[in-house]
Amino acid sequence: MANAFEKLIGQTLQAYRDAKIANLIFIHPPMRPVGMMGKVPCFIQSGKSPFDMAGIYYDRAGTGIGVELKETAEHDHSMSIVHPEKRGNGIHYHQLSGLVEVHKAGGVALLLWSNGGEIGALNGEDLHLAKVQYDASLKAEAANKTPARGSRSILWGRFNLVKAGHGGTPLWLPPSPVEKHTKAA
């Protein structure tokens, strides 16, 4: 079930397709059948999706896009990074890792956070830095040392505020990195 923030972002997907900017879809976690309820098959989740949305830019290279969406009702000063073997609120380690892989492969990775109604975007470079710091904190913990303060969360101040477009929908997708670097004729 999509929350209000996911529905708001979902409304922008058709606008990005219509403008020939990008084609994005929500990713659903893998499911497997477990039986039947009458004539209807029943499924359970059998894995995790790497992040919430994926897509490509309509650019010469078909640049990949990976997006994770997070929402908090109250304004928070930071978002937790959830340990790989734990549950909790914030960005889960597998989601952070998936976005960093998109970034390292030359794609656009974004973490969109509706923080008490204010929407911010964190780019791939900052996501990569957050993962490096978190991995260092895990190594420090394994060596019985105290992890660096702030290494297990992402400060709200690192996010770039997203502007509202026509009708109040957020303009969150940055321009294609390929189109910025095209050669002059």
Image (cartoon, rainbow, N blue to C red):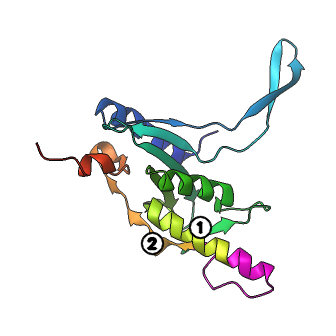
Q: Amino acid at mark 1?
A: Lys
Residue depicted at 50% across the width and 56% down the height = 104
Is 53 covered by the magenta stretch? no
Picture quadrant of residue 140: bottom right
For residue 76, say whether it is visible: no
Rate crowding at label 1 as few (under 14), some (14 to 19) or many (20 or more) other CA atoms within 10 Å: many
Q: Considering the numbered disc 2 on the image, is that residue within a helix, a strand or a loop?
A: helix
Eyeballing the image, is 116 above or below 64?
below
Percent from the top left, x then y, of residue 3?
A: 58, 45
Eyeballing the image, is 104 above or below 184?
below
Residue depicted at 51% across the width and 41% down the height = 54
In this rendering, position of residue 33 left or right of residue 20? right
Picture quadrant of residue 35: top right
Query: The magenta stretch spans which residues?
Result: 137-153
Q: Which residue is mark 2?
A: 158
For residue 143, say whether it is visible: yes
Q: Which residue is mark 1?
A: 131
Q: Earlier in the sequence, mark 2 or mark 1?
A: 1
